[in-house]
Structure formats: structure tokens, C-alpha cells
Amino acid sequence: MSPLDPFGARLRRAMDERGPLCVGIDPHASLLTEWGLNDDVAGLERFSRTVVESLADRVAVLKPQIAFFERFGSRGLAVLEKSVEEARAAGALVLMDAKRGDIGSTMAAYAESFLRKDAPLFSDALTVSPYLGFGSLRPAVELARESGTGLFVLALTSNPEGGEVQHAVRSDGRSVGATMLAHLAAENAGEEPLGSFGAVVGATLGDLSSYDLDIHGPLLAPGIGAQGATPADLPRVFGSAVRNVVPNVSRGVLRHGPDVVALRDAAERFAEEIRVAVVTG
């Protein structure tokens, strides 16, 4: 498929061919130390290069967390630019975990930073926060449609604090999280084989049967591994939408570095466990 194909179509193909797995690139200080690296730009570069070289040619999605690069300033962002470029060149889809959210021209500028095709940090998709109102994301939605990229909107996140906002009930009787899912379903209507506008829904949340997760778009599911959820939990949590789940694993894979073979083996184990759970669930 060409880069101009919609993100949802490219993601569906990548998951079918490589397995439904997203691996985070999260070079926080403690993980750099575990790898025997210094908490500096050189350590950051070694870490990121190793993850990309080990996994970008075999996993469906790599998800850099931008904060761990931004803390090193412009030199850290230069490492991120290189990592994104090399990961995409090797065939992985890159989901930039930046959780941007604002209004008007500011939201447009955030979108251009990651979703404009000639941007240094151009990525296949971007995480965004809708809690200034879903309509505040319109500049990002429009640019994503134009550029063939995607969005993952925070809907039902795995952190305990999220519930005070996401489970709050509106005057129409629907929760805020359910409202975000409904907006996404509307954006994905008519798209085949999969819409490009996804939701972030925690794999640790247990029974979500009261929510309609069939948004005809991808569901990024953090929480597998270190946060306690397992691939076997996915059918119970996501029900009929499980085939569109993109489970995110970070520490569960990254703790096996810097050994390249160990990183690859860990990613392959998770991908196979997820594939079996999705098929048999």
C-alpha cells in the first residue's frame, strides 16, 4: 500500500501481516540504567536505535513517548526524528504518543507538527486529548484525513484518575467516555476495512460491556504486561471489538534489552499470545 492510503487500511494490513502488537519506545531514566546506559543523549540514542533496529521490521506499530525525548531538548528531539524516520523506513507504523489537545490555531499547529507529510516528526498516527471538547480536535481530524494518517483519542484510559472525567455522566445520561466513542464511530462511518480514528481504552479496566466499543476503528489498549493485564484478558474486556484492538506493550518487551535477540523474542511471544487470544476469544 502507498503512504497515501488511509491509516486505518494500513494498520489493518500491518496487524494482519505482523500481528496486532504495538511496542512503546519509552526511554525513561530507570530503563536506561537497566540497559547499562547513561541518562543522557548518548544513552537515549543508543536505546532508541537498538529498539528500532530490533523491532521496526517485524512489529506492526512502534509508539515513541515524546516526553522522554523532549526532556533532553533539541538534541533529544533530533534523536526522535531519526528514530521515526528509520522506523517508518523499516516498515513499522509509528504512533507518536504526544497526547496533544488545544483549540483553534494551536491545535492545528500541533497537528501539523506530526501529521503534515513534510514535518520532521511526521508519524502515521498521533495520540490526542479531547477534553477541551471533541470539536477542538477538528483541525487534527481534517489534516489526518488529508494526509492519510490517524488519531488515537483518549477515551477510557487505564490510569485510576481518568475515571473522574471519563466516567462522568452528562446531562443526556451518557458518560463522557461513551460520548468520545460515539464521536469516533461517526468519524469512521463508511470506512473500509477500518477507520483511521481510534480510541485509547485500557486493557486493565475489566468489564466494559456497558460501552459500545465497536467504533469501526482501532482501539489502542495500554496495560498489557507491567500494568497487570494479559493477552488472555482481551476478549473479556473488548468483546466483539477485540479484532480491532492494538495492545500496547512497553516494559514487558523493553526490559529484555539491550540484547537484540531477546527483544525480538519477547515481541514475538507477545504478538503470538495476542493473536491466539484474539482468534480463540
Image (tube, helix red, strand yellow):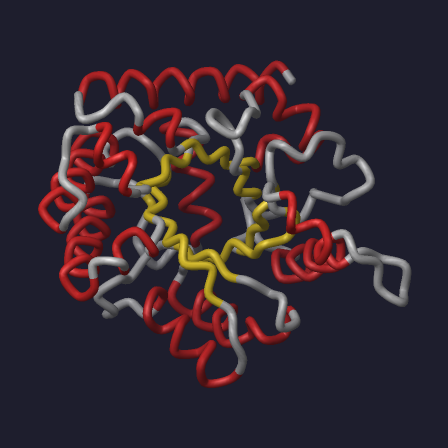
The spot of residue 154 in percent (x, y) is 58, 54
Q: Nearer the viewer, residue 7 or 167?
A: 167
For the point 76% across and 52% down, the residue is: 167
Q: Quadrant of the C terminus?
A: top right
**At which x and y percent is residue 6?**
44, 55
To which quarter of the image does residue 69 belong? bottom left
In the image, is residue 263 above or below residue 242? above
In the image, taking residue 214 as reference, residue 49 lies left or right, namely: left
Residue with the most extreme bottom position:
105
Q: Which residue is drawn at 84% across and 57% down?
A: 174
Asked where in the image residue 63 lies, by quadrant, the reply is: top left
Residue sitting at 71 percent across and 58 percent down?
165
**Residue at coordinates 61% horizontally, 14% vertically from top-left?**
280
On screen, residue 212 versus residue 13, left or right, reads right
x and y, in percent, of residue 86 in the image: 17, 47
- Residue 77 in the image, given as x and y percentages of width and height: 21, 60
Q: Which residue lies furthest to the left in this view?
A: 42
Question: In the rendered image, which quarter is residue 147 located in?
Answer: bottom left
